[in-house]
């Protein structure tokens, strides 16, 4: 009996190891995208998604998880290759929907816009409607250059505007830290405009030692005030299974956890409006009622 007991004790670690090995490895694709993911500096790991991922990982023990840093172009390539990969900060586009499975919306964020240095602000004046910039007309009429991150979506509405612009007006950046590099190019006068999100640009400009007084942010005419972020996995049986699991975890996280994390990165005068508006982002439409007989 003692020999049998020893034999069983020997087998337990083997069974545990086999169970561990049997778990599928889910690769989370992240890039340096403040205020969502921050991979360098004093606030490393304090981004909105930096704090969401550990919660998802803890509640998805059926998978072995790894976090992989990629630029946007490489991340999209991995998703198209149908590897077991998920991106926690993806906008919906019809092109991407052909090869990824989207979760329910995770977070509403202020939409992208154009950042200009105040020394160049007069160039934009004829194309402003209040604070909103007519980006299409500006870049059709002038020789100004707009810096954008290659393979990045800035919303369906903005992407549609970009497709209509002359190629000479766009400067695409493919590398890591793309938005930060575009801001440096802007300082050198190689681009006059940068497309991005104000909380992201504000953080990066400060990291580079700049002052926010040098910059002005303009929403793009014809776009919505807010846009929705999603988690997206490669559209495969494993990816669809993971999204179904994530969808069950999201309702509580997106109401009680995520909006407050994002609001901390906004200008103080925007926070209260955002927190009030976010309550409406995920409201389900009322079910239709049958007409009275």
Image: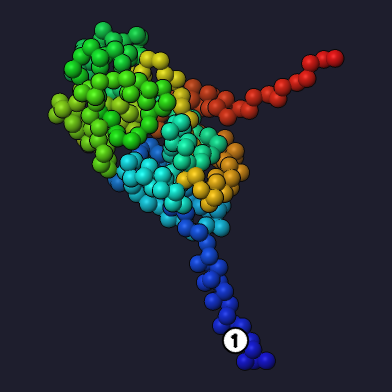
- Residue drawn where x is 55% and y is 68% of the image: 19
- Residue drawn where x is 22% and y is 29% of the image: 171
Query: Is residue 242 visible to us here?
Result: no
Q: Is residue 116 left or right of residue 226?
A: left
**Which element is circle 1 on?**
helix
Q: How many marks?
A: 1
In x, y percent, where is residue 12? Answer: 58, 77
**Image height of 70 relative to 95, above or below:** below
Q: Nearer the viewer, residue 239 or 274?
A: 239
Q: Nearer the viewer, residue 263 or 10?
A: 10
Query: Is residue 21 visible to us here?
Result: yes
**Image height of 258 relative to 280, above or below:** below
In x, y percent, where is residue 270? Answer: 43, 23
In x, y percent, where is residue 258? Answer: 50, 37
**Residue 203 picture quarter:** top left
**Image height of 129 relative to 42, above or below:** above
- Residue drawn where x is 37% and y is 51% of the image: 68
């Amino acid at each position: 009996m003692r020999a049998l007991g020893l034999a069983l004790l020997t087998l337990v670690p083997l069974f545990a190891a086999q169970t561990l090995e049997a778990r599928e490895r889910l690769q989370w694709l992240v890039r340096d995208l403040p205020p969502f993911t921050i991979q360098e500096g004093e606030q490393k790991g304090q981004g909105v998604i930096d704090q969401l991922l550990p919660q998802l990982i803890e509640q998805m023990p059926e998978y072995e998880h790894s976090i992989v840093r990629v630029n946007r172009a490489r991340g999209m390539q991995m998703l198209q290759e149908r590897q077991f990969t998920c991106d926690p900060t993806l906008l919906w586009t019809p092109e991407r929907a052909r090869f990824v499975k989207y979760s329910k919306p995770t977070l509403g964020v202020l939409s992208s816009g154009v950042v200009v240095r105040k020394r160049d602000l007069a160039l934009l004046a004829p194309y402003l409607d209040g604070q909103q910039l007519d980006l299409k007309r500006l870049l059709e009429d002038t020789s100004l250059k707009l810096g954008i991150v290659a393979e990045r979506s800035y919303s369906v509405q903005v992407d549609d505007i970009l497709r209509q612009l002359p190629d000479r007006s766009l400067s695409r950046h493919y590398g890591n830290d793309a938005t930060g590099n575009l801001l440096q190019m802007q300082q050198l006068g190689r681009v006059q405009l940068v497309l991005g999100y104000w909380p992201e640009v504000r953080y990066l400009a400060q990291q580079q030692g700049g002052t926010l007084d040098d910059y002005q942010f303009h929403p793009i005419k014809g776009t919505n005030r807010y846009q929705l972020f999603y988690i997206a996995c490669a559209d495969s049986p494993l990816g669809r299974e993971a999204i179904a699991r994530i969808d069950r975890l999201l309702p509580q996280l997106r109401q009680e956890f995520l909006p407050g994390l994002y609001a901390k990165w906004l200008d103080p005068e925007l926070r209260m409006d955002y927190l009030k508006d976010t309550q409406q982002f995920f409201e389900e439409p009322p079910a239709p009622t049958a007409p009275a007989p």
